[in-house]
Image: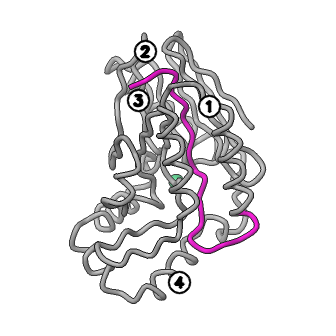
């Protein structure tokens, strides 16, 4: 994997056009301007798409512009890695073909001096039990096959229902946030004890950093229409930046 590695995610690109989606695409273009001469790698950490379902035949091309930007990154000699989030695990051949490598599960990167544990961040919390079962069902081949038989117009209605932006207020109260952070620190300690130096995740749509000695937990903020948040790892240290 080429250094530096740029981590980002939670762009939630929508299959239906909107002003906010256009702005998100513009932000991605700005980011490409910054990294285009880096000869490094990007690591998309999931929920890149707000909804993604790839059909085996006649796949509607909702994300033409985004796909072309990913291809543009690759033609600059930059490697493109992707890990699925809870909105975009139904990827298929077409998406995989524009990335260097795509993953459905957490990854450990051993590159440079540090070992990095990469996860989207969903399904970690102790009270996520029901969600973990749902995650298993939704990701199964049988569910995916049955879903592919539904009319595409219906599938787009589903997309609107599960849209991140539709979910009203994303503000979590202080107490809940403290409980979430405590759980994510506990999760990170397990990974640190297994030899990882940095645990990095998205999903929670806010920024949070926690250090214990030389070990680090980084929760990355999202890439919305206003800000493009990312982390840059140069093989030695990792910094959180935004555009
Ligand atoms: Mn997510």
Between the residue at mark 2 and the residue at mark 4, the CA separation in whole angstroms equals 43 Å
Closer to the N terminus: mark 3 or mark 4? 3
Quick one: 41 or 214, which is closer to the camera?
41
Closer to the N terminus: mark 2 or mark 4? 2
Q: Which residue is rendered at x = 47% and y = 40% of the image?
A: 74
Residue on which disc 1 sits:
35
Q: Which residues are magenta?
A: 1-20
Which numbered dot is residue 192?
none
Q: Which residue is rendered at x = 68% and y = 63% of the image?
A: 21
Counting other residues with Cα less than 10 Å from the Cα at mark 2, is it few (<14), some (14-19), or many (20 or more)? some
Q: Are marks 1 and 3 in contact (CB under 8 Å)?
A: no
Residue on which disc 3 sits:
117
**Quarter of the image with the N terminus in it:** top left
**Residue 210 on image: x %, y %:** 60, 24
Disc 4 is placed on an element classified as helix
Between the residue at mark 2 and the residue at mark 3, the CA separation in whole angstroms equals 10 Å
Which numbered dot is residue 114?
2
Disc 3 is placed on an element classified as strand
Q: Are marks 1 and 2 in contact (CB under 8 Å)?
A: no
Judge depth for marks 1 and 2 and give the one in front. Answer: 1
Query: Is 12 covered by the magenta stretch?
Result: yes
Query: Is 161 covered by the magenta stretch?
Result: no
Q: Are marks 4 and 1 in contact (CB under 8 Å)?
A: no
**Residue 18 on image: x %, y %:** 71, 71
Q: Which residue is rendered at x = 53% and y = 10% of the image?
A: 213
């Amino acid at each position: 994997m080429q250094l530096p590695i740029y981590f980002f995610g939670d762009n939630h690109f929508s299959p239906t056009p909107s002003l906010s989606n256009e702005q998100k695409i513009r932000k991605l273009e700005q980011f490409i301007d910054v990294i285009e001469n880096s000869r490094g790698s990007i690591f998309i950490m999931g929920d890149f798409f707000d909804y993604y379902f790839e059909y085996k035949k006649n796949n509607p091309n909702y994300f033409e512009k985004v796909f072309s930007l990913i291809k543009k990154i690759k033609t600059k000699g930059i490697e493109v890695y992707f890990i699925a989030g809870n909105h975009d695990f139904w990827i298929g051949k077409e998406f995989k073909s524009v990335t260097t490598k795509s993953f459905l599960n957490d990854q450990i990167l051993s590159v440079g001096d540090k070992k990095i544990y990469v996860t989207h961040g969903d399904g970690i919390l102790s009270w996520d039990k029901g969600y973990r079962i749902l995650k298993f069902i939704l990701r199964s081949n049988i569910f995916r096959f049955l879903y592919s038989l539904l009319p595409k117009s219906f599938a787009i209605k589903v997309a609107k229902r599960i849209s991140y932006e539709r979910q009203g207020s994303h503000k979590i109260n202080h107490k809940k946030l403290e409980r979430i952070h405590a759980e994510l620190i506990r999760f990170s300690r397990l990974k640190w004890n297994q030899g990882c130096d940095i645990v990095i995740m998205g999903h929670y749509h806010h920024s949070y950093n926690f250090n214990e000695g030389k070990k680090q937990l980084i929760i990355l903020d999202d890439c919305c229409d206003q800000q493009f948040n990312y982390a840059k790892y140069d093989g030695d240290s990792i910094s959180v930046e935004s555009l």
